[in-house]
């Protein structure tokens, strides 16, 4: 009994290694794109051979080298495509009134679609409360643990109704109709990747906005509700496509 208590105590104090076993089946998310950001994990979703979608706060800078076809970001798996960023278009406003968190990233050359690199369709409908969706990213899935993962992680989360989500909001967060919440107590509810991708029924439905579930597993995390942004996304693709000259990052 004393030995058991000692093991538990060491785990609580961090002396034992933290187990984070939510690893995706390798290359099962061929739309997921990775780029270097230091100690903060950021990523996004490929929606077209030229375009990625990510959160406002994860938008890479002009000239960043992004990697498609990744699973283990520390080794060359022979499946990767490394392409520079040619343009970044952020949805506004954000800093003055954080009602949107979305950015479009145009590649300097088109992605080559392979078994390991494929786009994810934009949503044809909005996610419904109770629907089970799948979130992936290169962040930790352990609450209050911040170290990024070298392997792509996957969790499954239930969509939560708007009012239930708003009831958990801290005072400093402003609710927006561009938000959708997912995850709750007794589910996998933490993905500390600010551009983690939420897919429901094979469609792109969210990119992470606030990882509330990583601070308190009882609270849902917040994602950009992409079904409300189809027109904006397609408009950006039309206006800032590869035939249009655009001098670096733009905020429309």
Image (cartoon, helix red, strand yellow):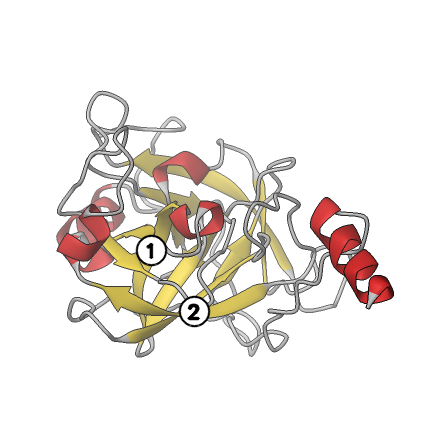
Residue 40 visible? The answer is yes
Which residue, as the protein is rendered here, is positioned at the far top? 96
In the rendered image, residue 35, in percent from the top left (x then y), is placed at: 58, 46
The count of marks equals 2
Along the line of sight, the residue nearer the viewer: 191 or 243: 191
In the rendered image, residue 207, in percent from the top left (x then y), is placed at: 36, 53
Mark 2 burial class by Cα count in 10 Å: few <14, some 14-19, many 20+: some
Which residue, as the protein is rendered here, is positioned at the far right? 3
Residue 201 has which mark? none
Query: What quarter of the picture does the N terminus occupy?
Result: bottom right
Which residue is pictured at 29% across the width and 36% down the height? 170
Query: Picture quarter containing residue 203?
Result: bottom left
105 relative to 113 in the view: left or right: left
Q: In this view, does 114 lie above or below 110?
A: below
Along the line of sight, the residue nearer the viewer: 171 or 194: 171
Q: Is mark 2 on a helix, strand or loop?
A: loop
Which residue is pictured at 47% across the width and 66% down the height? 188
The residue that mark 1 highlights is: 220
Which residue is pictured at 45% across the width and 39% down the height? 58
67 relative to 215 in the view: left or right: right
72 relative to 84 in the view: left or right: right
Q: What element carries label 1?
A: loop
Query: What quarter of the picture does the C terminus occupy?
Result: top left
In the rendered image, residue 27, in percent from the top left (x then y), is placed at: 59, 74
Along the line of sight, the residue nearer the viewer: 171 or 131: 171
In the rendered image, residue 153, in percent from the top left (x then y), is placed at: 58, 64
Contact between marks 2 and 1 (CB within 8 A): the answer is: no
The residue that mark 2 highlights is: 187
Which residue is pictured at 61% across the width and 78% down the height? 25
10 relative to 172 in the view: left or right: right
Cα–Cα gap, marks 2 and 1: 10 Å
Mark 1 burial class by Cα count in 10 Å: few <14, some 14-19, many 20+: many
């Amino acid at each position: 009994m004393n030995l058991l208590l000692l093991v538990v105590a060491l785990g609580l104090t961090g002396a034992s290694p933290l187990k984070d076993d939510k690893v995706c089946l390798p290359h099962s998310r061929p739309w997921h794109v990775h780029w270097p950001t230091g100690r903060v994990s950021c990523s996004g979703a490929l929606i077209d051979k030229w375009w990625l979608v990510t959160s406002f706060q994860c938008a890479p800078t002009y000239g960043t080298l992004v990697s498609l076809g990744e699973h283990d970001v520390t080794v060359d798996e022979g499946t990767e495509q490394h392409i520079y960023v040619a343009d970044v278009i952020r949805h506004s406003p954000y800093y003055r009134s954080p009602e949107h968190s979305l950015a479009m990233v145009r590649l300097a050359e088109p992605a080559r679609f392979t078994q390991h690199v494929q786009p994810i369709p934009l949503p044809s409908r909005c996610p419904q409360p109770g629907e089970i969706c799948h979130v992936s990213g290169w962040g930790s899935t352990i609450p209050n643990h911040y170290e990024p993962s070298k392997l792509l992680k996957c969790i499954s989360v239930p969509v939560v109704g708007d009012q239930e989500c708003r009831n958990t909001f801290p005072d400093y967060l402003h609710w927006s109709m561009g938000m959708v919440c997912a995850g709750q107590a007794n589910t996998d509810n933490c993905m500390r990747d600010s551009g983690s991708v939420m897919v429901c029924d094979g469609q792109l439905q969210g990119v992470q906005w606030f990882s509330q579930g990583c601070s308190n597993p009882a609270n849902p995390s917040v994602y950009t509700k992409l079904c409300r942004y189809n027109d904006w996304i397609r408009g950006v693709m039309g206006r800032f496509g590869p035939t249009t000259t655009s001098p670096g990052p733009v905020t429309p």
